[in-house]
Amino acid sequence: MNIAGFDRRDLGMLWSLFKLTLTDRYLGSGLGLIWAVLSPLLLMGIFTFVFTFVFPGRLPGREGSLAYTMWLLSGYGPWLAISEGLSVSTTSVVGNAGIVKNIAFKSEVLPVVGALTGLLPLLVCLVLIALLQVMSGEVPHLAVLSLPITLFFGLLFISGLGLFLSSLNVFVRDTALALPNVLTLLLFASPIFYPLSAYPGGIGKFLQFNPFYVIAASFRAPIIDGTLPPLWMFAYLAVVSIAVFMVGLKWFRRLKSFFDARL
């Protein structure tokens, strides 16, 4: 088995590092897995309160705060996965300097492991949405079976960005420091909290090609509307994700020979 130069041994290493990263990140803290669940719940609770009660949002054709809450969470959950995955990926090489310098393995797996950590807050969000749907009497549609496809290409996209940012962070340590601010700007510049129709003029038509929006919309369509995302979204996300991953991988492999001197 060979995926972009990764063989079975590398995939086994990826899985081992993923479990180790989750253990260090969550089980190493006082609250352990409780904090892993509580943290995304707090963030979702804050934004839900703000955009439901302080600056109430409304959806065309849907009434009530519960409908808007589910719509909001179905887009913010994927964003949490993106944000968490990129943050961990960016620091993955520098944070594992000892492993990179002393163990012979493909260090490319480290940013991919970082991207996978975003699965946990996404899972918490999906469980919460499922509970809200039960409360509202909604029944999940078969269209949710398309979510693994969106998830796969979303992780590929995050991994590609992580490969680029993690290698850049070895040489420019300000990359990790600047990332939270960039992510905040991207969050409010993307149609995550608002429908595309809320943007004036042709801005909405332009923003519909934002990959972060496409990922969120591809989650929302099956969960909220019970429909498959438009085929162009699947095709667009697949092309962009594969391109970003391959470019990020090439960039990483070009720079990795210089890592030892900078770590």
Image: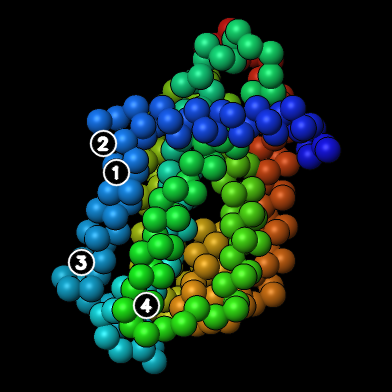
Tell me the colour scheme of the image: rainbow
204 vs 216: above or below: below
- Identify residue type, mark 3: Phe
Contact? badges 1 and 3 (CB < 8 Å): no
Closer to us: 145 or 216 = 145
List the single residue furthest toward the bottom.
61
Q: Which amino acid does label 1 sit on?
A: Ile
| Element on which disc 2 rests | loop
3 vs 4, front mark: 4
Q: Are marks 1 and 2 in contact (CB under 8 Å)?
A: yes
Few, some or many C-alpha atoms within 10 Å of disc 3 (few <14, some 14-19, many ≥20)? Answer: some
Q: Which amino acid does label 4 sit on?
A: Val
Q: Give me the C-alpha separation between circle 2 and circle 3.
A: 25 Å
Crowding at label 1, few (<14), some or many (≥20) Cα neighbours within 10 Å? few
Residue 89 shows up from this direction: no
- Distance between the Cα atoms at labels 1 and 3? 22 Å
Residue 224 in sight in this render: yes
Q: Residues within 10 Å of mark 2 (few under 14, many from 20)?
A: few
Residue corresponding to mark 2:
31
- Which residue is at the front of the view, 21 or 177? 21
User: How far apart, in angstroms, are the residues tagged by discs 1 and 2?
Assistant: 5 Å
> What x and y, as percent, mark residue 260?
60, 9
Residue that carries the numbered disc 3 in the rendered image: 49
What is the number of the mark on residue 34? Answer: 1
Distance from label 1 to label 4 (Cα)? 23 Å
Give the left or right position of residue 32, taking residue 234 as reference. left
SS at badge 4? helix
